[in-house]
Image (cartoon, rainbow, N blue to C red):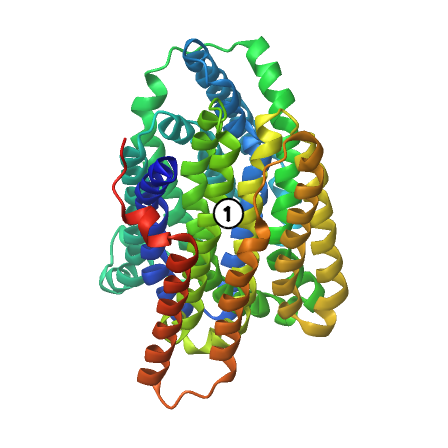
Amino acid sequence: MNEIRTLAKQTAIYGFGTIVPRFLNYGIITFFYTRIFAKAEYGVITELYAWMVFLLIVLTYGMETGFFRFAQKKEDSARVYSTSLLSLLITSSLFVILVYVFIGPVSAFFNYRENHDYIKIFAAIIAIDAFTAIPFAWLRKENKPVIFSIIKITNVIITIVTVLFLLLWAPGIYEKSDGWFRSVYDPNYRVGYVFVANLVGSISTLIMLLPYILKIKPVFDRAIWNRMIGYSFPLMIAGLAGSINDTLDKVILRRMIGEDNGLATVGEYGAGYKIAVLMALFIQMFRFAAEPFFFERAKHENAKETYAYVMKYFVIVMLIIYLCINLYISGIQLLIDRSFRDAIIVVPIVSMGYLLYGVYVNHSIWYKLNDLTRFGIYITVIGSIVTILINVLLIPVYGYIASAWAHIAAYGTMIIMSFIFARKHYKVKYNIRELIPYFVFAIGMVVFSRLYNYKNLVSELLINTIFIAAFIIYAQYQDKLLTVFLKKSNK
């Protein structure tokens, strides 16, 4: 129990570096974008950021997890850090050079033949973000969540201020100016300034991380690198397959629906998806704390018991968050403009899909601990096949609703496959059956909230708050949820 509280504390601190800045992003940027951009313009943002997820996996090629795996011994930590840092510096630099040299065909591939500058800016953003993944991993390994969070929050604040300046305040300055400002600012660039602001944020992050980059003596240990690549490359393949589950819908919708309405549909879906992604943010917050925690606890005799307890309380807490997102949707939906709100229908589906992904993240530690990362490939490839089939076959019939359900189908399949493979290699008694009533209650409450005709907003908030309170009371009665997290640690 003390270990769970330790992990919860670390997760909460990492939340300031993930949840807080993302809430700022959603509260200001999403609110702003969906009110100044047409659906097609917002579709450009949604689509290109979906590509970014895919490309970041390629450019980090599993080195982040590889760093945690091989930097456990104190005497190897510095060499592993330096080697992985230099590796990503070289590959990220090559990526930018290649994109700039072959900008014509690259832009054509992404269907942005008339906007080479979008692709150039994106290449720079992706390269910087890929390179800084290792310094951020070092901060996590060294248990420096406060510094990690400060840098992440500062990045978002700088990006938000830059966006607001370029899209809200600069047009007014442009109108009043008759000098140099008119030569550097184009009020018609609009969506392009979103990417410019992101680049400014990424550069600022790189500058803030320089003390943790330059402090290490540059050493490239080829033997360590070969071992890391052997371990990490399967994770990259698994990550690529996994990114299909996360990003294929935003990329394929435009191409399947057609250019006329494709980007508008992507924009509408992307706005609803943004709300559902709130669930993914909490899971990401947990992953930042859990990955080093799981590797460190693997040395302990009761590691499997710890993993089982973590899974149970993770699911319970995530279901509470799931209820908060979906039962208070009348308020949360104000984050997006009214014209985008038809896509609210995907929120309970996609958010449940991400919850299932969180279960998989918990369970997948078995193959990472045992250097069996090839199983990550098998599992995620199977999940990506499910995603592809559902999107390709059902988008023409059901539109983006099919894309939403693909998340549940894919991640559910991955959980099943992970449990099957783990039986022979690293079996942990998770007692998943004990969690079934929690899922039944949570899903039942959300379904009721969608079907019941509330008299007014006050009655909706009152009834749904009672639902959440009842769920928490049940969790306290069944598994002492509040006792676990509120009781002081003995350590």
**Residue type of the residue flagged with mark 1:** Asp
Percent x, y for residue 259? Answer: 65, 66
Residue positioned 30% across, 38% down in the render: 151
- Relative depth, front residue between 299 and 360: 299
Mark 1 element type: helix
Counting other residues with Cα less than 10 Å from the Cα at mark 1, is it few (<14), some (14-19), or many (20 or more)? some
Percent x, y for residue 39? Answer: 50, 70
In this picture, is 171 found above or below 99? Answer: below
Residue positioned 25% across, 41% down in the render: 488
The answer, for residue 183, to whether it is visible in the render is: no
The residue that label 1 is drawn on is 117
Which corner quadrant of the image does residue 98 belong to? Answer: top right
Q: Is 329 positioned to the left or the right of 490 in the image?
A: right
Which quadrant does the C terminus fall into? top left
Q: Is 89 positioned to the left or the right of 145 in the image?
A: right
Which quadrant does the N terminus fall into? top left
Percent x, y for residue 322? Answer: 45, 62
The answer, for residue 453, to whether it is visible in the render is: yes
Which corner quadrant of the image does residue 81 belong to? Answer: top left
- Relative depth, front residue between 300 and 350: 300
Residue positioned 48% across, 73% down in the render: 445
Percent x, y for residue 444? Answer: 52, 72
Which corner quadrant of the image does residue 105 belong to? Answer: top right
Q: Number of labelled discs?
A: 1
Q: Is 292 positioned to the left or the right of 410 in the image?
A: left
Residue positioned 34% across, 84% down in the render: 459
Q: Residue furthest front?
A: 477
